Image (spheres, coloured by chain):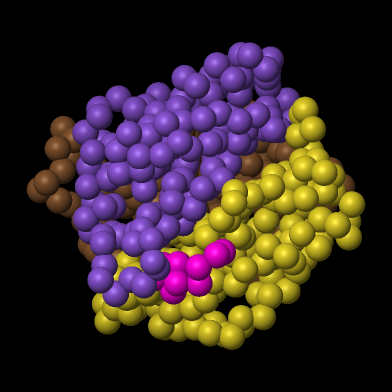
Chain colours: A brown, B yellow, C purple
Amino acid sequence: MHKITVTTIQTTELVDITQRLQSVVEETGMDDGILYLFCPHTTAGLTLNENWDPDVKRDVLLTLDNDIAPPDSRHRHGEGNSPAHIKSSLFGANTLVFVEGGKLQLGRWQGVYLAEFDGPRQRQVWLKFLHSATG
Amino acid sequence: MHKITVTTIQTTELVDITQRLQSVVEETGMDDGILYLFCPHTTAGLTLNENWDPDVKRDVLLTLDNDIAPPDSRHRHGEGNSPAHIKSSLFGANTLVFVEGGKLQLGRWQGVYLAEFDGPRQRQVWLKFLHSATG
Amino acid sequence: MHKITVTTIQTTELVDITQRLQSVVEETGMDDGILYLFCPHTTAGLTLNENWDPDVKRDVLLTLDNDIAPPDSRHRHGEGNSPAHIKSSLFGANTLVFVEGGKLQLGRWQGVYLAEFDGPRQRQVWLKFLHSATG
């Protein structure tokens, strides 16, 4: 597998890693197939979303942090970061992206994000290229 | 990759695409492996859920639209569809389904859905067939 | 595909299946690639999260069951388990995990869980090993 390191700077943050992934595709000579991404952390995740208007990231995190999984005095986990664990399972630790002709294939407005929910930290993303049956 | 177009008719809607996918499997001669599905949109997603009682779809969307990611005056994204972006990341833009003997393999009550969160629109689903090591 | 059966004992429960998966990897001689997991149920799911402090599981389910998708008198689905269907789509029915040298590759704190949302029941997880292009 290939690994990239992502340094986050805020408690919760959507870090656009699209260009980093495109560079890995180019460096490793992937041509046609599917790039598999795995996040080996339990207080972070991976997601696809709009990378045009930065207010989308802001609004997504505002609702997620304040309403969907806010701090909760009923939580018992000693580290106090249970909301981050919840968000990690909601977003998921995997994603897959098409590659054709050495280029990531995304929708017009899509970017690939590492979702940091308990930063700032150093995070890793593990990558591997999958063959398709017809590619 | 193979692409299918899905026309949605409501603002939020779960469109059962199971039969469309089965047709693609048959047309393209996929036999044993895994069908990968990708949604190139940031206000829609892909999910698996019950396709027997239509009230399941209704209840899922009712809670999602009204309670989990409702309209919110704190949102700033100019298009006003931040709840759709949130729901897209919660459901995810990918799924994978087993194919054996040219038939999609799903649980007894499962269907594959395009989840529309900002319709009505024309949506695409991108597909590719993956080999397995043992299939 | 390979199938394992998981017996759940509570209404909602995160069942750590990491060791079960490692056993399947060893029995079937998988070496380097990616293990694909599929949950053929619409009131359960698959997720990765911390498997060290059991309070993480407790806190995740507490928020999910009470706040994100609680029982709701507006739901119409006759079986009364619409919250379980919602949680199933939020967590997702698929996950993928790296295997190298015959060992599951997870982050330091990660375990693989079957998420039961409408138990107790007998559940299945379907598995298949995927080749990578470079593995």
Give me the residue at 47% from left, 41% from top: C46
Verify whether residue B105 appears in magenta: no
Height in image: A69 above or below A40? below
Please name the predominant secondary structure of the magenta segment in the image: helix
Q: Answer whether residue A20 is visible to the viewer in this image.
A: no
The number of numbered discs placed on residues in the rendered structure image is 0
Give me the residue at 59% from left, 51% from top: B108
Height in image: A80 above or below B55? above
In the foreground, B62 or B39: B62
Verify whether residue B58 appears in magenta: yes
Quadrant of the image occupied by residue B28: bottom right
Give me the residue at 55% from left, 36% from top: C125
Height in image: B129 above or below A65? above
State the image coordinates of residue A34 (x, y, percent, origin top left): 72, 46
State which quarter of the image contains the C terminus of chain C: top right
Q: Answer whether residue C95 is visible to the viewer in this image.
A: yes
Left or right: B134, with C92 as reference point: right
In the image, the segment drawn in magenta is B51-61
In the foreground, C108 or B24: B24
In the foreground, B51 or C104: B51
State the image coordinates of residue C113 (x, y, percent, origin top left): 42, 34
